[in-house]
Image: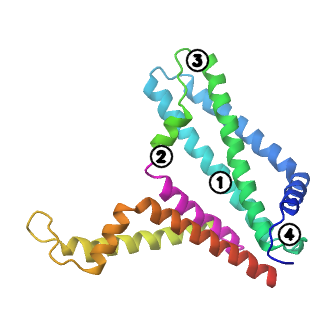
């Protein structure tokens, strides 16, 4: 199978996955509705706009996290299936990888499509209930979005690369990254400042690198995200060769 991408084969992969896993999509919708009922019961006693807004953001964050983990588990099961059917389908690795990403995007899009009509339905039942806007959510996460994309790509890579304990391995990767960041800040940044109100005493290459990452952190995190997704693609290709 050559590496040329065929949209027709991607379409067939998506159709085959829909036929095979449409019951799981129904389950995902049902789980959302159950969670919405619980959310409705929890918010029905609220009296202030601040409480309404806070719980809506909480529901959004938890729901998005659950749907993303559900997708990663789904991708992991397809890649690590004991029968290996997914890896032997008549499509190249790029097409299979793109199909996984498209399915992840569609699942997250489904969550968003269900979310706001549900919030508005709740607002009809609760007097004075104000629904958060999508633009408001995007503005709230604007600064952290590159970081969230980077952290999410690590989880996705973990589920593609490891058959067992993928989430725990991702948490371990987070711990290593956090520890390395703290070490760099402590050793190369904090120790590099003199007593003259934070003036850097030695303009070392490490200083310039850190200064670059601070100024262009969004670009750096998005680039790192693409790099991790490429590693996930290579892992999928490696499993196909095996």
Instruction: Locate residue 227, reporting x and y percent.
Output: 57, 72
Figure quadrant of the N terminus = bottom right
Q: Nearer the viewer, residue 45 or 185?
A: 185
Choose mark 3 or mark 4, whichever is in front.
4
Q: Earlier in the sequence, mark 2 or mark 3?
A: 3
Label 3: few (<14), some (14–19) or many (≥20) C-alpha neighbours in 10 Å: some
Q: Are marks 1 and 4 in contact (CB under 8 Å)?
A: no
Report the Cα–Cα distance between label 1 and label 4. Answer: 21 Å
Image quarter of residue 78: bottom right
Residue at the spot of label 2 = 141
Residue at the spot of label 3 = 126
SS class, disc 2? loop
Image quarter of residue 35: top right
Q: Earlier in the sequence, mark 3 or mark 1?
A: 1
Instruction: Locate residue 89, reporting x and y percent.
Output: 89, 70
The colour scheme is: rainbow
At horizontal 46% and vertical 74% (from top left) the residue drawn is 176
SS class, disc 3? loop
Choose mark 3 or mark 1, whichever is in front.
1
At horizontal 46% and vertical 70% (from top left) the residue drawn is 175
Residue at the spot of label 4 = 86
At horizontal 56% and vertical 36% (from top left) the residue drawn is 134
């Amino acid at each position: 199978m050559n590496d040329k991408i065929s949209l027709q084969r991607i379409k067939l992969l998506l159709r085959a996955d829909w036929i095979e896993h449409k019951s799981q999509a129904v389950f995902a919708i049902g789980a959302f509705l159950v969670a919405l009922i619980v959310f409705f019961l929890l918010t029905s006693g609220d009296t202030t706009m601040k409480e309404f807004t806070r719980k809506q953001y909480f529901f959004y964050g938890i729901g998005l996290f659950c749907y993303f983990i559900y997708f990663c588990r789904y991708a992991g099961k397809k890649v690590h299936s004991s029968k290996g059917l997914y890896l032997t389908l008549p499509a190249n690795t790029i097409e299979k990888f793109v199909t996984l990403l498209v399915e992840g995007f569609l699942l997250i899009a489904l969550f968003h499509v269900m979310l706001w009509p549900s919030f508005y339905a709740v607002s009809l039942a609760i007097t004075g209930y104000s629904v958060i806007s999508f633009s408001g959510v995007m503005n709230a996460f604007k600064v952290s979005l590159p970081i969230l994309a980077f952290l999410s790509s690590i989880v996705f890579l973990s589920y593609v690369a490891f058959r067992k304990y993928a989430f725990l391995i991702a948490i371990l990767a987070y711990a290593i990254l956090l520890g390395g960041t703290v070490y760099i800040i402590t050793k190369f940044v904090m120790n590099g400042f003199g007593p003259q109100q934070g003036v850097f005493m030695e303009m070392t290459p490490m200083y310039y690198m850190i200064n670059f990452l601070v100024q262009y952190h969004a670009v750096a995190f998005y680039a790192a995200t693409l790099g991790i997704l490429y590693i996930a693609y290579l892992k999928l290709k490696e499993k196909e060769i095996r």
